[in-house]
Image: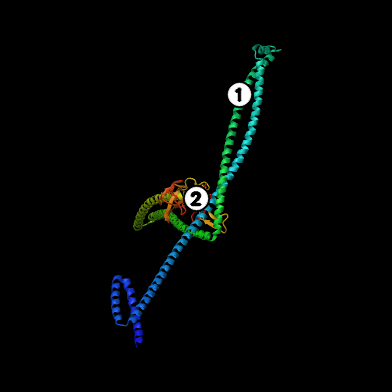
Amino acid sequence: MIKTRIIHTGKHLWKVVAMLFLAFCISLYFAPQTSAQTKNKKTVTKTATTKKSTSSSKKSSTTTKKSSSTKKTSKTKTVLSESKKLQNEQAATKRLRAIQQQKEKQLNHSIKSNLDSVILISNEIVTQQHIVDSLNRSIKIVEARIDLLNTEIEKLKKDLKDKKDKYANSIKYQQRNRSAQDELMFIFSANKFSQMLRRLRYAREYSSYQVVQGKLIRAQQHKTMIKQNDLLKMKTQLFFDKIEKKERQEALKKMRTNCEEKIVYLNKNLERVQSQIQVYKEKEADLDKQIEAAIQKEIEAARKAEAERKAREEAARKAAEAERREKERQLAEAKEAKARAEAAKKAAAERIALAQKAKEEATNSVEKKDAKKEISNLKSEIKAAEKDMKKADADIKKADEAVRLAAQNESVKMAEIDKWVANDNNAKLSSSFTANKGHLPMPITGSYVIAKHYGTYTVPGLKAVTLDNKGIDIKGHDGAMARAVFDGEVSSVFQYGSSYIVMLRHGSYISVYSGLSSVAVSKGQTVTTRQSLGRVGRNSDGNIILHFQLRKESARLNPEQWVR
């Protein structure tokens, strides 16, 4: 009995202890101090109740309580540890993801930077190679000129030596025979007078010959000195050309090495290169879409203006023609009225003649009276006809003057229309622009390099990489300005992203300047050749790049064929 009661009391105590532990955990979370006090009170109460039981029950209850508390505390610590571990793992995953994204971004930037560098360096290599080839040709020409100058100088030296020898011999001969008595003896020892005159002339000519020889020697020396100076200049030019050639060859070698290293790197990441090229194409397509829309808008506006101009011309022509026809109609009507009056006058005159005859033939007074009355009436008709004729003459004169003025006015208006057509600024600009093909200035100030060429092209060394450009990209230096390639009018200025685009109309031709950081012109403004349009800005890689396009209406042109 006692054993059963103890077991029953133990079970009851286990439930009590579990409830107390739960309350203890809750109290620790919300109010640790209050919970501790409550726990102490409950513990005292339970202890007092338990004291009424047997001492063995007290020991069993105390042991069970401690065991249960230890298990719950251990379980709570395990949950907290797992939660903290999970949070640490999530934070580590987040850090790894951020690091991976940063590496991805750096890799993409590296791909883009290397791709841009390869394109730019490839074009610079071509430019430098052209310069080196030009230097080689120049060096060959200079060397050939140096050989020619050496030959000429040797010949001049030989001729100079001969002249000097001859001059020296003549001087020696003159020194040996320089006495006036010898010269006189030579002259007067002639056999006859004509021989003496010839000897006198010979003596004078010999003296002149010596003077001339001296002048020839000086001229030959001067000529030789000029040739030697030319030779020195040629050798100096050759020296500096060879130095420049060597420097450019070394720079070319470095560029090729750098380009090859970048190409190897890009070929290893070809998939990313293709992705970057796709990004380029999308950006270029978007830019071209904006430019195309602006150009189409400009073309439509120009066509509308042209249609309105032609409509005005046609209306003016029709109005002048209608005015002339109306005056001609009035003139014709006046002439018809005059003709009718003349016919009426003629008919009345004929009737008067008949009435006069009838009067003369009348036998009685009644017939004579009727004839006389008829003649009077006919005379009134003639007066009325004459009056109508006078009025018709006045109308004819007035209408004739009106027709003359209308014809003159029509001629003036037609001349004005022809003058409008002849002085059409667009037609003039188009004609002048076409005539300057290959002679237009570059659209950027300062030194430059064409970074991207027009049309579809490949980059040497890159596998399956094709690029397309609707214009040319020109790399400039700090402070570079975009400038007009020809006289024209600013047809559009608009912003694309963080840069500006300026469009100029040159008659039927349109030039496009993209990538400006600031603009110095406004829509509708007239500009002249080489006038500044704005400052060229930097692209995402920090390079100063001007994108230049050339159109004839909507048809694209290769700018490299138009600029020099």
Q: Residues within 10 Å of mark 2 (few under 14, many from 20)?
A: many
Q: CA distance from mark 2 to mark 1?
A: 60 Å
* Amino acid at circle 2: Ile
Q: Are marks 2 and 1 in contact (CB under 8 Å)?
A: no
* Amino acid at circle 1: Lys
Q: In the rendered image of this protein, does residue 14 appear above or below residue 136?
A: below
Query: In the displayed image of the protein, which residue is found farthest to the front?
Result: 55
Q: How is the image coloured?
A: rainbow
Query: In the displayed image of the protein, which residue is found farthest to the bottom?
Result: 1
In front: 133, or 416? Answer: 133
Quadrant of residue 369 in the image?
bottom left
Instruction: Provide the secondary structure element on which disc 2 rests.
Output: strand
In this picture, residue 387 sits left or right of residue 141: left
Q: Which residue is mark 1?
A: 215
Q: In the rendered image of this protein, does residue 443 appear above or below residue 275?
A: above
In front: 280, or 462? Answer: 462
Residue 558 visible in the picture: no
Q: Position of residue 392 (x, y in %)?
A: 38, 52
Q: Position of residue 281 (x, y in %)?
A: 50, 59
In front: 168, or 404? Answer: 168
Q: Position of residue 488 (x, y in %)?
A: 45, 49
Q: Nearer the viewer, mark 2 or mark 1?
A: 2
Q: Position of residue 442 (x, y in %)?
A: 49, 47
Kindly identify which numbered label has been placed on residue 474. 2
Rendered residue at 38%/76% (across/down): 67
